[in-house]
Every structure is written in structure tokens, then in C-alpha cells.
Amino acid sequence: MNIQCKNRSVRHLRAGRFLITLLAVTLATACTPANHGQEPVHISGEAQGTYYSVIYYDSLQRNLQPQIDSLLDAFDQSASLWVDSSLLRRINAGETDTLDDILKFLLENSMRIMDYTDGAFDIRVGGLVQTWGFSFKERTEPDSATLAHLLCAAHGTLGNNNYHFYRENNDTELDFNAIAQGYASDLVANFLDGQDITSYLVDIGGEVVSRGVKSDGSPWRVGIERPSENRYSEPVVQTAIALQDQSVVTSGSYRKYYERDGVKYSHTIDPSTGRPVTHSLLSASVVESMGWLADAMATAYMVMGLEKGKAFIATHPNGPGTEAVYFIYDSCGTLKSYATPGFEKMIIKE
Ligand code: ADP
Ligand code: MG
């Protein structure tokens, strides 16, 4: 592997620089004398094969990068599928059944969302994701017997008993990639909370968690990317939203896919068929209280597609996942968006 992994990293880093630039411009205009001379601290680096950027106001102007780097590294050692000695890789391989706090959280909360989304979001897709070439293995076209075997493994019962993982089918492989960046952002946010920092913006690969307001009293401003023509296009901000004490996460089909006979196969797997999703929804962005939850719901909407996603929101008015924006090409190839009323209110009109 890792041509795929490297591409992912370079692309995200480019996207990251863009977002960082956008935020830097915003912050530069916000840092007026009204903020009592406080300058934001801005740190950035790489984690989970992508970029990260953290901006916070700290009267002590501490550089918390070493602690954040080691926190993100510990996260990768636990939940990353790209680190071949990670605890998750060892659990999938059957070498251990003992979970740590990170995997316990991810497992238990993922199981709640699997239930809530009627299986659209499903962490048991690990074997399928690998076979279709969206993980650490090269893509192989599964024949019907292989697909049936993988689907069977993806439908086996899971459980957790006092940090001991249980799976009915030993071939069931867990994949937390759909919530890993969102949850890692939450963990960085928790760390900053513990440092008595009350205003920050954490962004890991575009999965953003915010707290408080900027030093001029205005909310954080976050760009939502316009779905691009293809994976190589430079990111362009389609719309900006105001964020305060919330998270926003986007899942998309327009960068991670492969193309065959003119059809794009996205890295999102429909757990009911075991196949990559091919419908025309380009992206789903969700605003939620927590990064992991926004991340899980954004992936679920990418499985559901536009109409089912809209119907889901209508039938689950108390959430989670009620504030979202979807981007889609209509039958004439024109980019269209659909935003829920609450999401619409967050959009900054200039
Ligand atoms: P992105 O934000 O990069 O668009 P997502 O958050 O939607 O991505 O996560 C996609 C990843 O989640 C896939 O690469 C795969 O590892 C995993 N995945 C694919 N399909 C599903 C699914 N139906 N439920 C949960 N995880 C999935
Ligand atoms: Mg996701």
C-alpha cells in the first residue's frame, strides 16, 4: 500500500493549508484591541495520515503541541488501521480481546449509532472496506462467494464485557475510520478543557470541534468545502458557517473513490449489500455537539443518500444528526444543496 495512503495525506495537507489560511485571515481581522491583547496560539501537524490544526486562546500563551502530538499518537496506536501494530489491528487479527478506553468508547458508541441509523453506519464493514481497496490492502474484485462470506462476517453480533471484546464471527473486522477523526478531535478538545482553555477550534482532516468564541466575541467561522470534480482538485470553500460550542464534520464521495466504466465507487460501503455506494450524493455535513457523533451521522447519510437522509431527519426530529447540509448534482449536472433550517441559520451571509 501506500500509494493510496500517501495521496490521502498530501491531499488533506493541501486542504489543511487552505483551511488554515482561511482561518488565519479570519483571525487576523478578529484580533483587535478588544481582545485585551490576547493572540491566538496556532499549532498544526500530521495525524491519522492527514493534517491537523488547533487554534486556541491562552492567557499563558503555552505551546501545547508536544502534549497534543502524543495524544494523537496514542490514538493512532489504539484505533488506527494504518498502524499495523495498533490495538485495533491486533483485535481484528484475534491476537487479543482486551480493549482500551479509546476502543471501548468507539465500540459502545458505534453500536448505538448502528442501531439508531438502522445499520447505515456499521463498524463491521472492515473486511469489505479492505477488499474494495479503501483500507490498508490493495483492491480485489470479490466474486459472489467472497462477497457473501464478507457480508456474513459484517453481520455477526458484537459485544463488550468489561473491556473484553466479543464477536460471534471471528472474521468480523472492525473499522472505526468513519468516526476516528471526529473522536480524535473530541479528545484534543477534552485535553484543552483540562488545561482551562475555553476558546478553541480543533480541526483534524476537516473534522472540526469548537468551543467558546473568538477574542472579539464573534463565533468561530468554518468553511464547508465545495464538492470537487475529482480527487485532485484544490479545495474551494462553498459556504462558511458560524460555530460555537459545536462540531461540524463532512463526509464525501468526491475524493475517495475508484472509477470503472464511468461509474464512481465511493469509499462508503452500503452494509446491506456489501458494495460501495454509487448514488449521486456528493457530501453530507453534520453539525452536532460532539465530533464523533457528527462524523458517524455524516457517514450514515452518505450511505442513505439524499432522499432517505431527508426522510430520516424528518422522522428523527430530536436527533442526533438533525442539522445537516447535503450536496448533490442534479440530473443536468448542476451542483445543488439541501440544508436543514437549523443548518441554514448557521450559514454566514456576506
Ligand atoms: P470521509 O470523512 O473521509 O468522507 P467517512 O467519515 O465517511 O469519510 O469515513 C469513511 C470510512 O469509514 C471508509 O473509508 C471506511 O473505512 C469506513 N466505512 C465505510 N463505509 C462505512 C459504513 N457504512 N459505516 C461505517 N464506516 C464505514
Ligand atoms: Mg464519518
Image: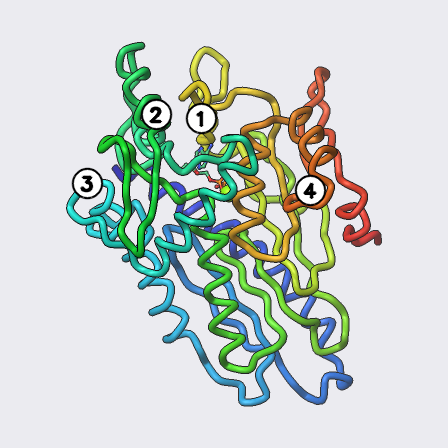
Q: Quadrant of ligand 1?
A: top left
Query: Given this view, does label 3 or label 2 mark the residue nearer the observer?
Result: 3
Placement of 201 over or under 38, stated as above or below: above
Say which quarter of the image contains residue 20.
bottom right
Say what amino acid the circle numbered 4 marks. Ala
Residue at label 4?
324
Q: Tell me the residue at 47%/49% (across/down).
A: 109
Say what amino acid the circle numbered 1 marks. Pro
Are dots 3 and 1 in contact, CB under 8 Å? no
Residue at label 1?
271
Q: Tell me the residue at 31%/56% (across/down).
A: 162
Query: Given this view, does label 2 or label 4 mark the residue nearer the observer?
Result: 4
Q: Quadrant of the N terminus?
A: top left
Residue at label 2?
132
Q: CA distance from mark 4 to mark 3?
A: 36 Å
**Which element type, helix, strand or loop, lies under badge 1?**
loop
Is 314 in front, or is 288?
A: 314
Say what amino acid the circle numbered 3 marks. Ala
Residue 247 percent coordinates (x, y): 61, 56
Q: CA distance from mark 3 to mark 2?
A: 19 Å
Q: CA distance from mark 1 to mark 2?
A: 13 Å
Are dots 3 and 2 in contact, CB under 8 Å? no
Closer to the N terminus: mark 3 or mark 2? 3
**Which element type, helix, strand or loop, lies under badge 2?**
loop
Closer to the N terminus: mark 4 or mark 3? 3
Q: Tell me the residue at 65%/85% (across/down).
A: 38
Residue 250 percent coordinates (x, y): 58, 44
Residue at label 3?
93
Q: CA distance from mark 3 to mark 1?
A: 21 Å
Q: Give the crowd class for mark 3: few <14, some 14-19, many >=20 residues within 10 Å.
A: some
